[in-house]
Amino acid sequence: MRYALYYWPSIQGRGEFVRLALEDAGAAYDDAARTKAGMDRMMAMMKGEAEKRPPFAPPFLKAGKLVIAQAANILFYLGPRLKLAPRDEASRLWLHQLQLTVTDFVKEIHDTHHPISTGLYYEDQKPQAKQYAQSFLKERAPKYLGYFEKVIAKSGGPYVLGRKATYVDLSLFQLIEGLRYAFPNAMQRIERKLPGVVAVHDRVAKRPGIKAYLASTRRIAFNEGGIFRRYPELDD
Amino acid sequence: MRYALYYWPSIQGRGEFVRLALEDAGAAYDDAARTKAGMDRMMAMMKGEAEKRPPFAPPFLKAGKLVIAQAANILFYLGPRLKLAPRDEASRLWLHQLQLTVTDFVKEIHDTHHPISTGLYYEDQKPQAKQYAQSFLKERAPKYLGYFEKVIAKSGGPYVLGRKATYVDLSLFQLIEGLRYAFPNAMQRIERKLPGVVAVHDRVAKRPGIKAYLASTRRIAFNEGGIFRRYPELDD
């Protein structure tokens, strides 16, 4: 099966959580919206010009006749197919539950720079962003990351499910990478209590598929159009 | 199978989307955290005192040995079992994708009164809430609800999947009920373009299980501790 991933072409964004799984597994896929024609196709699919079941927003994955949207839903589908999740229902639901907690966290990370409206620029909501980021870095980020730390400890480690890496571990890698980019000072402080999560990050970085991907031009650099943005005034 | 639902006892909140499915189907379940002992059990499960896979937050469902968290994940699991979703993979993924869009919408609804921090009272973030609510009511609510309107039209109606009601339709009912409670003026305006969504709401309200539930004391009234809050200053 050759997959087509549709996502905004200039940012990592929510598409990156899917991309990491495809790259880790060495799956055959097209990053379809990185061409003008692909971008037009993506917009047409969202409008529902030909789709009976149009997605609300990218990322979405075309897998044969299926079009699947929502990053966590795509990973739920891909997990066992890419050998990044077991096949039994209990483990699949548990991993998905963890991934949905990642989704919630990602939304709060996004809101550190856009607390009032996605229709406004960051520059138009800077004081509110500073307020949001303060409580995010003090309470929310330690709470979410501390939860994953607990999950890893309870699994016996080194990964969230135990001995085998899953797509959730790839997402934890991305969270740490992105948070270090956006909040280098705060993360120095926060990471002290996260030996298990940081170890997952380091292990994932060394996986052959991920290592090759990170060194390639397919990996878009972090930038101030994405979810993780470096605005020094929001950091500790 | 007798289920146990764990959720904060004084609000509808995110637990309500699960409760509506259980009630519609006439499932055997305990609303487990409505007693002091149940509430203590809920807190212990989150702490992971005995759980190997502790949930991050309520709602969660105990189904035999499984503990499943995240409302959309619970509904994914319950859907076919309660005959509120088909069994084929394509339809299940599609319904789940829609439910995850409901989840995203619910978070934005919550943020109309808590745009800066869940650790602060509404009274401590009122001007920011007014700003958030304005763009929410002008742009985001019409966008989300307009999307579901399109989905219903494309299915042929009357429900999101066509002729048979699903758990997503129950969630649309709850969204309309809650938004009417929170923003009665804005909803008069917004609903004009949503004949299909409003028709789903009206049909769901008449389903025997839902009708009996709404008339019972099991249905907690909307209140200013929940997701949908009536603060007239935030309305149109």
Image (cartoon, coloured by chain):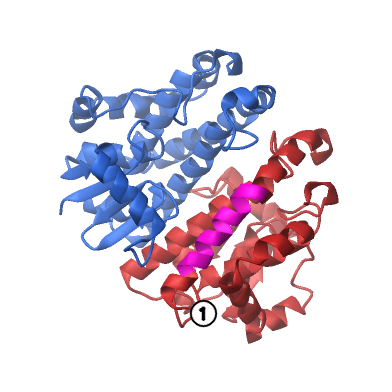
Chain colours: A blue, B red
Looking at the image, is B172 positioned above or below residue B210?
above
- The image shows residue A37 at horizontal and vertical percentages of 24, 44
In the displayed structure, does residue A4 sit left or right of residue A51? Answer: left
Looking at the image, is B28 positioned above or below residue A86?
below
In the displayed structure, does residue B233 sit left or right of residue A236? Answer: right
In the displayed structure, does residue B95 sit left or right of residue B203? Answer: left
Secondary structure of the residue carrying tag 1 is: loop
Chain letter of the residue beneath label 1 in the structure image: B
Considering the image in quadrants, where does the N terminus of chain A appear? bottom left
Type of the residue with mark 1: Pro
- The image shows residue B185 at horizontal and vertical percentages of 78, 59
Tell me if residue B143 is in the magenta stretch.
Answer: yes
Q: Residue at x 36, y 75 (%)?
A: B87
Considering the image in quadrants, where does the C terminus of chain A appear? top right
Q: Which residue is mark 1?
A: B158
Tell me if residue B112 is in the magenta stretch.
Answer: no
Looking at the image, is A139 positioned above or below residue B13?
above
Q: Which residues are magenta?
A: B138-151
Q: Residues within 10 Å of mark 1 (few under 14, many from 20)?
A: some
- The image shows residue B55 at horizontal and vertical percentages of 54, 49
Who is closer to the viewer here, B150 or A141? B150
- The image shows residue B180 at horizontal and vertical percentages of 74, 63
Looking at the image, is B39 positioned above or below residue B206?
above
In the displayed structure, does residue B192 sit left or right of residue A154? Answer: right
Who is closer to the viewer here, A236 or B161? B161
For residue B86, what is the image quadrant?
A: bottom left
Res B180 visible: yes
For residue B18, what is the image quadrant?
A: bottom right
Most prominent secondary structure in the magenta stretch? helix
